[in-house]
Image: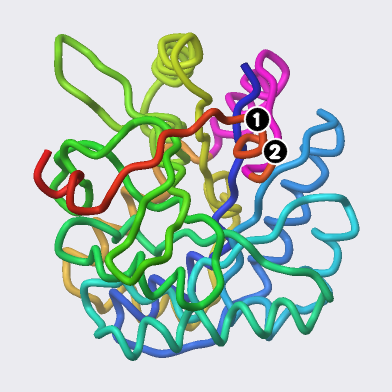
Amino acid sequence: MINALTIDVEDYWKILSCDWLKSYITPTDAIVRNTNQLLDILQDCNIKATFFFLGEIAKKFPNLLRQVVNQGHEIGVHGFHHCVIYTINEVKFYEEISSAKKLIEDTVGINVEGHRAPSFSIMPKTKWALEMLSKAGYRYDSSIFPFRGRRYGWPGFSRDICEIELPNGQSIIEVPMSTVKILGKLFPACGGGYLRHFPYFYTDFAIRSIIPLRPVILYMHPYDFDTEPGPKDIITKLRKAPLRAKFHHIQQFHNRHTVIRKLRLILNKYQFAPIREIISNSNMKRITLNSILHN
């Protein structure tokens, strides 16, 4: 079984500053340093991946985008400003996905087919986002976690790659995120946060459990292994921030130093490719959006 390796290209320090410290900044140079380190690892392991870029990062660091493309990786869109879908309306979402798509395509001269929502925020209450994506010219989405979670998730959604017939007469392919069944209950797996917080055994167990049934969709962020101190002005603001923001920061840095070792073990043990290759080899079912909602 060939699995998909996906990278959500976002800057931790920018998201921390905007979402938790209420201070707007543009993406920092850390995203370039971290992505370059990840590119070196993938080159060492001879693996190609799908990189979902934020439009704001492609705009500020176009050479980073070109470098990823030149090394043979697939490019997708992760929105423009990392706006979680349920915090914005349909007009704003369409602007996010269409402007990011156009910017990236104009920068590297390729057609962008794939999308991943910030914080996996396509769920029943934001199902309209699938129609907006098809309208904007996307072929596939990879945002839905088919489990019942606290912050995200779509309980009852197919765990297999599928093509969804939409109410607007169009369709879109969904590549759902990986879940593993433990004692009859589905749990999220195969992501950067799980590589950080759990032992290597958990991700390895999840991959071994999933691959007899379907391809694994492994995802991570370039910052998942970044242990470098942040910009001084952000650290200064963090010291004065509410306890909740400080706890979030501590949690995000937990076990980052273990991720590269775990990632190399996984990449050397299993086969990975970009999502476009997984889709081309998939015998997917065609389902309707209404059938999912009434499942």
Main SS, magenta region, reads helix
Towards the viewer: 29 or 194: 194
The residue type indicated by label 1 comes to Asn
Q: Is residue 37 above or below residue 241?
A: above
State if disc 2 and disc 1 touch (CB < 8 Å).
Answer: yes
Residue plotted at (64% across, 65% down)? 31
Residue marked by disc 1: 281
Q: Position of residue 193 (x, y in %)?
A: 40, 41
Q: Dot 2 surroundings within 10 Å: few (below 14), some, or many (20 or more)?
A: some
Residue nearer the viewer, 51 or 92: 92
- Please name whichever residue, 43 or 103, is drawn nearer the observer in this view of the structure: 103
Q: Quadrant of the N terminus?
A: top right
Left or right for 11, reference 104: left
Instruction: From this view, report whether residue 258 is shown above or below residue 233.
Output: above
User: Where residue 165 sits in the image (x, y, percent)?
Assistant: 35, 54
Mark 1 or 2: in front is 1
Indicate the amino acid at tag 2: Glu
Residue located at (80% from left, 70% from top): 110
Q: Is residue 53 left or right of residue 116?
A: right
Q: Which quarter of the figure has residue 287?
A: top left
Identify the residue position indicated by label 2 in the image: 277
For label 1, the SS is: loop
Is 56 drawn above or below residue 230 in the view shown?
below
x and y percentages locating residue 253 in the rendered image: 42, 48
User: In the image, which residues are magenta?
Assistant: 257-275
Percent position (x, y) of residue 265? Answer: 65, 18
